[in-house]
Structures are given as C-alpha cells and as structure tokens.
Image (cartoon, rainbow, N blue to C red):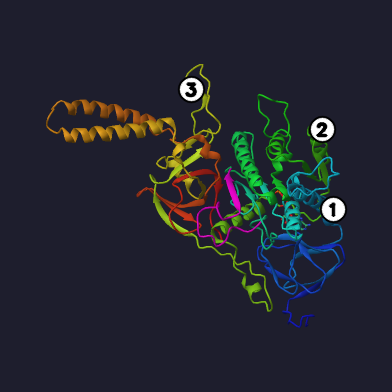
Amino acid sequence: MNNEEGQAAGPSNEFIELEPGSEWRFELEADENIAVRVHTADPIYINSSEIPRSTWYPLHRYLKSALYGPSGGRLEVSALPGSQYSSTTTSQPALVSLHLALERQRILARRHIAGSDAPAYDAPVTRGPRVMVLGPPNSGKTTVVKNLVNMALGSGMGWSPGVIGLDPSSPSNLIPGSLSLSTPVHPIPTHHLAHPLGSPPGSVAANTLSGDVSTMGWWYGHVEPSTKGMDLWMKVVDEMAGRWKERCDKDPNAMASGLIMDTSSAFAVPTLGTRKTEPKSRYSLVLHAAEAFEIETLLVIGNEKLSIDLSRLLPALNIIRLPKSSGVVDRDEPLRETEHTQIIRSYFYGEPALPKEIDILLGKMVHPDHSLSPYSFQIGWETLTILRVGEENAAPTSALPLGSARTLSRTKLSRVDPAGPAHVVRLLNTVLAVVAINKGDWTGAERKRKVKEEVEEAVKVECVKEEGAEGGGEGEGGDEGEQGEGEDEEDEDEVPYKEEIGWREVLGFIVITAIDTQRKKYTILSPSPGKLPSTVAIAGSIEWVDSA
Ligand SMILES: Nc1ncnc2c1ncn2[C@@H]1O[C@H](COP(=O)(O)OP(=O)(O)OP(=O)(O)O)[C@@H](O)[C@H]1O
C-alpha cells in the first residue's frame, strides 16, 4: 500500500482515521516499540506538542499516552499496539479553554511590565499565572502540567514558563527523589516514559545541573513526601521558591510567563504534614507551597471533596475543577518501579537509542538524539563523605539519660560509616546527590579543629627553630597531643558541615555500583567523565540497578 507522500508503508503498517476532536490512546508493553506518522494537513498533537507532518515520531516501550486531533486526521502506525482505541471523550477542550485564560493573563502581565497597559485598568495584572495542579494518584496531574506548558511554549509568544516539579516520583528531567525547577523554551516531547516533563540535559559534559542548563534540582531523597520528612521538604521548597523569585526579579519574561506546578498525590492527603503541635491543621503541603510560590490558582483534578476543602481553606485563591480524563492509565507498583528505573537510566545514559524496529522505517524520522557517556571510577571511602539528612542514625529515646528529652533537629546531618557492615549493605546501589561545600559551611567544631591544626603547625615550626635548646618541651607537647587526640575522637561522629547543605541545590547525581570492603573503595557511576565537583554527597532511599 502506498500513502499520500508516495513513501512505502511497511508490511505491518496500519492507518488510523481520527474523528475531529478525538484521541487515539495507546498503552505500549515491554516488547512494543512503535512510530507514528501524520498524513493530513490538520495538526495532530501529543500532549499539546504538534507532531511534525510526514515524519516518523518514535514511541518507546512502556509508554502510555494519546494523540489528539482537534480537526481529525489520518495517522500511520508502524505496528498496531495490543492495547489501543480511539475516544471522543477528551478533556483537551477544557485544557484549551484554561490555557486561553492563562494566556490572557500572561499578555496583560507582559504589557504591565513593559509599562504599556491600558490606563483604564484599576487592577493591573502584574505577573503571569501561577498554577498548582493537584489530584489523587493516577489522576493525570503530570499530563495536565505537560499540556499547559506545551500550549504556552507552542503559542509563538516566546514564553518561558517555570515548571516546578514538586512530585519527587516524576521529577522533570531528574532522578526520582528530587524536586526540580526548569524553564523550558521548546515544547516537551513524549517519546518514552522516562522524563515525563522533559528530556535530560543531554550531551552536557559536566556533573552539574546548574549554570548553562535550564534545570535546577534539589534532593529530598524519597519518592513520596512524609510527615517525618516535613522539615526537610519545607526547607527545600522555600529554597526553590527563593530561586524562582530571584529569576523573576531578573527576567521579566519569566515573570510574565508564570509557573505551572506539578505536585505529588500526597498533597491531596489532608493530614499529611500535620504536626503534633497543630493537630487540626490540614493540607499543610498545599498551604506551604502555595504561600512559598505565591500561587493564585489551584487546579484540582477529579476530586470534588479536595476542591471543596481547599476553597474553604484558601478562599482568596481561584479553585478550578477539571474532570479526570477517561484515558489516564492506573499505574501499578511494578510499572512505577519500571518508570523510576528508566528515568534514572536516562539520567546517566541519555535518551534510549532508537529500537531496531523503528530505526529501519523508511522516511524522515524525529531523532531524540541525546545519548550521554557515563563514567565509572573508584574512589576511596575516606575521600567521599556520605551523609544522610534526618534522625535516622540517632540513638533511640530509650537510650537517653533518664528525664532528658531529645532535642535533635529533624534535618540533622549524620555521616554514613561504610565500615559498619549494615551501612555497606545499604549503600550498595544507592543514588547520591552531590552537593557543593563552601567555606562558610564548616561548623564551629570543625573550624576550631582547623584553627588548632594551624596553631600546632606554627608551634612545630617554632620547635624546629629552637631545636635542642630546651629538653623539657617534648613532654609538654606530648600531653597536648594526647588531649588533642581525645578531642578529635569526640568530633569524629559529628558532621563538620552546617545542616543547610541538606537542602541546597544539588550539583548532580552519582550511584554506588560496587563496594570493595578489602581495599575500602566505592565504584561510582557518574553521568560524565572528570573529577567529581564535590566529594560530599547525600543519600536517601533511592536505589538503582541497571537492568537496561
Ligand atoms: N488521555 C490519555 N490517554 C492515554 N494515556 C493517558 C492519558 N492521560 C494520561 N495518560 C497516561 O496515564 C498515566 C498517568 O498519568 P499522570 O502521570 O499524568 O498521572 P499523575 O496523576 O501525575 O500520576 P501520579 O499518581 O504519579 O501523581 C501516564 O502514563 C500518562 O501518560
């Protein structure tokens, strides 16, 4: 069979006629890699990013998504997936209406910032929309965020909206367990399930995420926020909000473009984050993030109670309810784990190569060509300092002296001692976030130790100068030495850094892929060759074994 473009269709190629306003939905299994090609002039979108006409668009295994044709169209599919169907019950028109309202706000904000808004406006629009998307698990939050961002990026107005990833289970571009802030300028593609909100900073020859790369990451270390981890969570979110504010202060386009925030489904749990001191507080995660980022619109997907609760709790905000799309796929635990594994793999290796069955297709092809060359090397235990944030390694309350209460901070840093057998087992395959250490990060104890070292060094120099003159000096020095050792031992368990490094923007991620207990060395996988940008790294509960 020949298609309109005169290109030969393969033996298993199929054509799909999309009715106007309908979606073609598909769920790819582990062995299904396909590509689609549009054969009509009317646009066809995948998550509101237009598919280039007459060009194969690869869709990798495990992906579950939909193509939308507002005016209908003809699609060619390289092989029909086992699970696929067309539906006219789409939530796309509702998303388009919402986008138009957000677009109006962006335009008014841009005019105001440029000083050219109409004088008749009593309430000028000073900044772009700030939208938080909320909903229960598998309600389609990330998909809605992606669609709204892509519509803004595809509008031709030059917007650069902030994409705030407060869902550590599907962070934009990064490792699960991290929170992210990115400012994409091109529509985000949907080729595979890794990187739901965009591709990794491919071909960037550095271990760093900041600087020239438009994604900033912070490490929470777990895929779900929890009440126990609330202090760290809030500090990270405040830090991110500070960076977003700085960006808006410097960049009028970011200010006018606004932000779209993806959230964890834990945001919809009313009691998550409720502290013993305030037992009646509800939706702490929503309240805190809304205040930090000065959110003015909450978009609640398919949960009536949540939108009613929030409209009572936050009467000053616009609460918009959006029906859950009937196409959203309920992902089970194994599928989520596969998703996480793939996301981590593509952080290190870049976008997956085109599978053979797609690569052999004749005709033009969209090439998501961003492969990376990860680097594996060994590093001594003593060279890499691994920390954890939280009370995990603190002594149990029962071990404290009678009558004393624990006053440890919930963001206290503790050092992971690889020599402890239990620690080694836990460290294997652990993902670590590398953090920068500055001069001001040393704690008082460590600073004291460094000053003492300098004084001792100076005394040694003096002794050398006066060598042989006074015989009794040695004994005194010996006493000091013993005292010093005692103090050093006391300091040994203490982490010499301030807690702040626990919620600092991370430089990048590494994985411990092997541990040599004899030679006391870790084998590390890093996304690119070269020295590590810092030898201090923070562990969480994220592990990764490359199963390709
Ligand atoms: N209309 C649709 N047709 C087909 N698949 C869809 C559609 N909308 C969403 N999906 C798929 O459903 C799955 C779940 O959607 P999504 O990740 O957006 O939900 P979520 O609410 O963010 O999930 P989480 O529980 O992780 O917070 C994804 O694989 C997504 O690609």
Q: Main secondary structure of the magenta part?
A: loop
Instruction: State yes or no: Cβ of the residue under disc 2 lies below 8 Å from any atom of ligand 1.
Output: no
Query: Which of 441/300 is in front?
Result: 441
Label ID, residue 97 = 1
> What amino acid type is highlighted by mark number 3?
Leu
Circle nearer the N terminus (3, 2): 2
Percent position (x, y) of residue 308?
A: 83, 36
> Where does label 2 land, which residue?
312
Percent position (x, y) of residue 319?
A: 81, 41
Does the magenta-highlighted stretch encompass residue 214?
yes
> What amino acid type is highlighted by mark number 2?
Arg
Separation of residues labelled 2 and 1 (CA atoms): 25 Å
> What amino acid type is highlighted by mark number 1?
Ser
Say which of marks 3 and 1 sits in front.
Answer: 1
Name the element at disc 3. loop
Report if residue 391 is visible in the image. yes
Q: Residues in magenta?
A: 198-219
Query: Which of 404/528 is in front?
Result: 528
Separation of residues labelled 3 and 1 (CA atoms): 60 Å
Circle nearer the N terminus (3, 1): 1
Query: Which of 265/118 is in front?
Result: 118
Direction from residue 498 to residue 320 in the image, left or right = right
Q: Quadrant of the N terminus?
A: bottom right
**Do the residues bearing badges 3 and 2 touch, measured as CB atoms within 8 Å?**
no
> Where does label 3 land, which residue?
400
Circle nearer the N terminus (2, 1): 1
